[in-house]
Image (spheres, grey):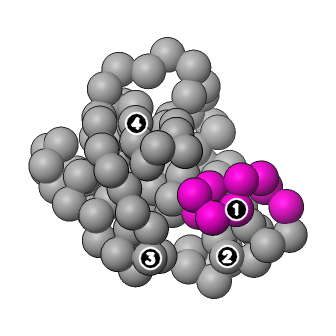
Amino acid sequence: MKHWRDREQFKARVIEWAAKLEVKAHSIYVRPMRRKWASCSTAGTLSFNDELLGMDTQLGDYVIVHELLHFSVPNHGKLWKALMRAHLGDWEKIERRLKARGI
């Protein structure tokens, strides 16, 4: 499994996905978070749990895409699920792996 080299590599990946998904990310933070893997604000601020840096990149991509899609789809309904599948394939399998890690 491939892991993130550092915060800058992770942030660069967020920027790549944001461009691909045509989303404007105003600010990107990687910081300690106790209760979630990530969050986003309507102002375009993204915060990611720094524990993601020690995980494989597939899990990071799942969290990145999950959050970025919330800029255009605020819920986890049919459209959000269809977009997750379009960009990540079997995203439910990745989600189960992430949930097994806690939080």
Residue at 54% across, 52% down: 67
Residue 66 visible in the displayed image: no
Viewer-nearest of labels 2 and 1? 1
Residue 38 visible in the displayed image: yes
Give the spatial CA distance, label 4 vs label 2: 21 Å
Mark 2 touches mark 1? (CB < 8 Å): yes
Q: Earlier in the sequence, mark 4 or mark 3?
A: 3
**Label 2: few (<14), some or many (≥20) within 10 Å?**
some
Residue at 47% across, 76% down: 21
Q: Earlier in the sequence, mark 3 or mark 1?
A: 3
Residue at 24% across, 52% down: 10
Residue at disc 3, secondary structure = loop
Residue 103 pos. (x, y %): 60, 25
Front position in the image: 14 or 3: 14
Residue at 62% across, 55% down: 70
Front position in the image: 46 or 50: 46
Residue at disc 1, secondary structure = loop
* Magenta region, main secondary structure: loop
Mark 2 lies on residue: 83
Residue 88 pos. (x, y %): 56, 75
Mark 3 lies on residue: 22
Q: Is residue 73 magenta?
A: yes
Mark 4 lies on residue: 47
The correct choice, above or below, for 21 with respect to 5 in the image is below
The correct choice, above or below, for 69 with respect to 67 in the image is below
Mark 1 lies on residue: 73
Q: Which residue range is magenta in the image? A: 69-77
